Image: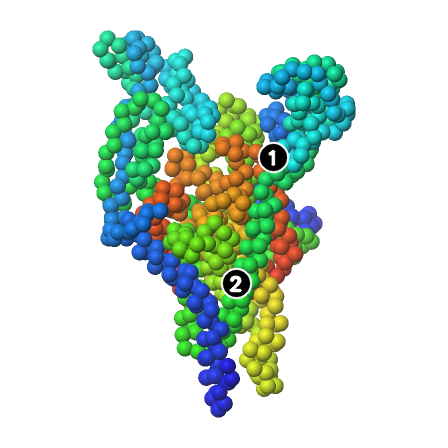
Amino acid sequence: MRPVKGLPFSEREAPFGYALVLPALLYLTAFIAYPFAMSVYLSVSDAQAGAQKWNFVGTDNYSKVESYDLSGNDFVIASRLTPAEAQALVDTHKDGKVVTSVEGARFKASLEVGGRTVPVFASDTEDSAAYLATTLLNDLDWQVRAKGTEAEVVAHSGDSALALGNFTDRKLLDKARKGDVLIDAHLEVKSIGTGVWQDPNFILAVKNTLKYTFGTELVKLFFGIPCALLLYRKFRGRQLLRGLLVIPWVIPIAISGQAWLWILDSTYSVFNWLLVRGGFITPQNILNFRGDPHLAMASLVVVNVWRGFPFTTIIILAGLTSIPDEIIERSKLDGTNALQRFVYVMAPMVRPILMVSLLFSVVFSFTDFNTIWIITRGGPYDQTQMLATYAYQVGVNAGYLGKGAAISLFLFPIMALTVFGMLQSLRKENM
Amino acid sequence: MKRLRIPPDLLSWLGLLPFLAFALFPFYWGLVTSFKADSNLYDLTRNPLWISHLDGRTGKPYHKDIIVPASYREGPIEWREKLGDHLLRSDSEQHPKPLAVIDGQEILSPVDGKLLRIDVAQGAIAHPNEQIGDIEVENPTLSHYRFLTQTPFYRWMKVSLLTGLAVVFITLLISVPAAYSLARLRFRGNRAIGIAIFLTYLIPPTILFIPFSQLVGALHIDNTIWSLILSYPTFTIPFCTWLLMGFFRGVPREIEERALLDGATRMQMLRLVVIPVVLPGILTAGIFAFTLSFQEYVYALTFISSTANRTLPVGISVEMVRGDVYFWGPLMASAILGSLPVVIVYGLSLNYFISGMTTGATK
């Protein structure tokens, strides 16, 4: 493109400018804007993987998520007992134990109670099977029920104790009914409400996502600020330490996550070894990090902090490095101590960049799929499911593209708010 | 009174030590595991943080009985290895060499180690389920690393590296001109386009993977490396463009104007004058594009379904677990080897990387 003679320098830049930016615009339109629009379109359809025809269903995917709840059911633990035997079983069930075993490609959890072994659940992961069996053993109300002259023992599930059936769709529910529950439970499916806000799994995913995101940010800053200040000082080996510190952030989490899985292993966890060694727990009640919902959530938070704090450190360090030396020197001459210098001189100058790092980090955690998928796969029994993994579960694994797209789009408003915040903070910085 | 002075170097090291320990522990743990023989790996009586040669229960070196499989016929035994010979674990070899043969039936070594004892002498009759000898287990061992050659590990590595390089190429080809244009040239909509490109970085794969899988299916490139090469620039282009704009802004305007006055066309000026100046920035952007695509997981998990075409992170996490059995030794060996490419890239370019972050984040 020849520059046109006689025009001012800046006027002639336009054609060249458009030509250079065009490939990027075309690419991003085709592969971001178009899929995004398609996502919105899918979310108002009943699209399923492999289906030929999609129908428009309006806002059903958002407002009418059918959910089923298996709470309020009785799980028959043992039948054909004498009333005395039954009562004895109920009385001693708190001493019972959960045992898992491998059966084919699945894990089976059994209860060892009152001298008998009752197989109760089978699941794809040991954690889920153990979690369900433990809930059945500890959280449900065990009762004796007379049946003619004989008696049976049932574990009665209240309205929320064993939310066994937080399944969003029939397919998963049927699979669970056929494959997961071994004992003779009188399962009754009832639809509880039609709004997405009444889908217990969705609400849990939203809660988990918020916990996971905001629970980790402060910790990352808490680790990142001292690290950045220490690395800001000049000392021998600074380059090396800086390099070592960023390693968690550069290695794919799917790879380093394997090491974490091994650290959190149910039998061979090194944490358990340390706790037993230190006398905090006995070898009989070691912690099952991925089998207990709270420990599983805590594990995810630790892994996220581990992976994220090096990034926070580097960004803050970049901010510190960009402060002109004269400003620091002058404040030294003014007789400030290190703390005062940090609070009154460095912190205000680093603030904009800190905002950028915070917002990046929030976006990273909020949309994180990898860490959760690798460490807990949303388990045990969907208790650590988050928006991204839940969307994958429903959209890809179960094949409900429309519903999956609707769930993933719920990430968008939060992203938009974050972007707005980011722009505001950048604008302030520019002024 | 003199104050006790701690050398400042030591202070920094001490202060950073707990953070470093936290950051590096999983790698240490993986590294130690990858060299442990299975009998040590699953020995709860031993300190798991270090490799032990001795069995915690017996106080003697770990050993492994050689037992004739129950399905074998009885027959005279023909030893192929002598006492003290070094044996290799059979599942880590393409053509494992039997340590003994009973009536045409091969006895393979389950571990790396040394033939310690022979219980059934050469030519004597060996029975099913009978112990015919003993192996002293080699610990530490390289057998987990050798096992990887029997898995598609190196194939996944190739897929990941190829994808990474292709993505770097496409990203730079598109991002460099776009960044220059947005950072330097004045035209209508310049600022709006810049913001729009930056914002697309904030529409992550977790929102796009469902429609993108349909798109990839429609283009008939699902289950191929092309689906990744096409999709990864969706996050590398916005990020690298944003990063490169910072570098282009730092180029003095005078050198461009001088080149134009010297009669260069705009394209020549860009190629011969501007790009050499921002080469460090381009290198940084390339590193970022490579690592971002090397780390990617959701797209690779969704679009690729055959074992052979998986990327390294997905391959390791999905295929190295057989049924429900985790092979921790080979798993850790593959994790350690799998992290090497990015660690090397970062080791070589850490300074560029950090200055790149600084420039990108502050400008």
- The residue wearing badge 1 is B329
- Residue B95 placement: quadrant: top right
The residue that appears at 55% across and 55% down in the rendered structure is B163
Check the residue under mark 1 and report the chain it is in: B
**Outermost residue toward the front?**
B104
Q: Is residue A136 above or below residue A174?
A: above
Coordinates of residue A289 in the picture (x, y in percent): 47, 33
Q: Is residue B98 visible?
A: yes
Give residue B171's mark. 2
Tell me if A14 is positioned left or right of B137 in this view. Answer: left
Tell me the crowding category of disc 2: few under 14, some 14 to 19, or many 20 or more residues within 10 angstroms, Cα based: many
**Outermost residue toward the bottom?**
A6
Coordinates of residue B218 in the picture (x, y in percent): 40, 55
Asked if badges 2 and 1 are on one and the same chain, I answer: yes
Tell me if A77 is positioned left or right of B43 in this view. Answer: left
Tell me the crowding category of disc 1: few under 14, some 14 to 19, or many 20 or more residues within 10 angstroms, Cα based: many
The residue that appears at 34% across and 33% down in the rendered structure is A175
- Residue A126 placement: quadrant: top left
The residue that appears at 30% across and 24% down in the rendered structure is A185
Tell me if B190 is positioned left or right of A156 in this view. Answer: right
Amino acid at dot 2 = Thr
Precedes in sequence: disc 2 or disc 1 = 2
Q: Secondary structure at mark 2?
A: helix
Amino acid at dot 1 = Gly
Give residue A58's mark. none
Coordinates of residue B356 in the picture (x, y in percent): 57, 62
Q: Secondary structure at mark 1?
A: helix
